[in-house]
């Protein structure tokens, strides 16, 4: 199955009539750390799209780049057991979302999302940066734009670090 492209994501952005443009970089932006380094922004400003399958239904979590997602919180929000919450594999990301891991944007997916959760930790920032459909592209969004584009629900999804 062919992956969707940055053009697909730009079309999804344009449908909202925002003046938001995807930027392409020579360097990889496939991880939150790489993206923050390329942009020179806080790691937490990177909005990483984490793909889950919950009872075979796609669930997207847009998380702050400096946080790990706690699948127990996703399970609780959906009222299912933790065993039902599975990280999507690379081929599933491509088939369901249309993009390989490291390039999944928060909008413009191949399959409409029934559930999208937005990490409360993103609220620390006025502007966040999301993957633009390739491992070398990013675009800025305000929190209001993120919420409107995804119709997502704000949720505390961050894993609490255990003291060592």
Image (cartoon, helix red, strand yellow):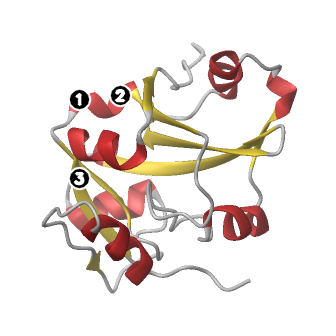
Residue at 60% x, 15% y: name it: 162
**Where is residue 39, by image quadrant?**
bottom left
Which residue in the structure is indicated by mark 3? 141
Foreground mark, 1 or 3? 3
Mark 3 vs 2: CB contact within 8 A: no
Q: As displayed, is residue 9 above or below residue 126?
A: below
* Badge 3: residue crowd in 10 Å (few <14, some 14–19, many ≥20): many
**Which of the image's four quarters has the N terminus?**
bottom right
Label 3 or label 2, whichever comes before in sequence order: 2
Rendered residue at 48%/82% (across/down): 5
Q: CA distance from mark 1 to mark 3?
A: 14 Å
Q: Quadrant of residue 59?
A: top right
As drawn, the label of residue 142 is none
Residue at image position (73%, 69%) is 95
Where is residue 58 drawn, in percent x and y?
69, 47
What is the spatial separation of the Cα atoms under label 1 and label 2, in whole angstroms?
6 Å
Query: Pointer 1 and pointer 2: residues touching (CB < 8 Å)?
Result: yes
Left or right of 69, for residue 11 = left
Task: Between label 3 and label 2, give the one nearer the viewer.
Answer: 3
Q: Which residue is mark 2?
A: 121
Quarter of the image with the C terminus in it: top right
Numbered label attached to residue 124: 1
Task: Establish if 100 lies above or below 47.
Answer: below
Mark 1 lies on a secondary structure that is: helix
Badge 1 crowding class, 10 Å Cα cut-off, few under 14, some 14 to 19, many 20 or more, is few
Q: Earlier in the sequence, mark 1 or mark 3?
A: 1
Q: Mark 2: which secondary structure?
A: helix
């Amino acid at each position: 199955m062919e992956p969707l492209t940055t053009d697909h994501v730009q079309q999804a952005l344009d449908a909202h009539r925002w003046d938001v443009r995807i930027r392409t970089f020579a360097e990889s932006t496939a991880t939150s750390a790489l993206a923050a380094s390329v942009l020179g922004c806080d790691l937490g400003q990177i909005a990483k799209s984490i793909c889950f399958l919950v009872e075979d239904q796609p669930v997207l979590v847009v998380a702050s780049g400096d946080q790990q997602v706690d699948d127990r919180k996703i399970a609780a929000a959906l009222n299912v057991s933790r065993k039902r919450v599975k990280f999507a594999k690379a081929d599933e990301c491509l088939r369901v979302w249309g993009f390989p891991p490291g390039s999944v944007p928060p909008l413009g997916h191949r399959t409409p999302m029934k559930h999208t959760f937005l990490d409360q930790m993103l609220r620390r920032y006025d502007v966040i940066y999301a993957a633009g459909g390739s491992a070398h592209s990013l675009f800025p969004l305000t929190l209001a734009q993120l919420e409107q584009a995804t119709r997502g629900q704000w949720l505390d999804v961050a894993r609490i670090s255990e003291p060592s």
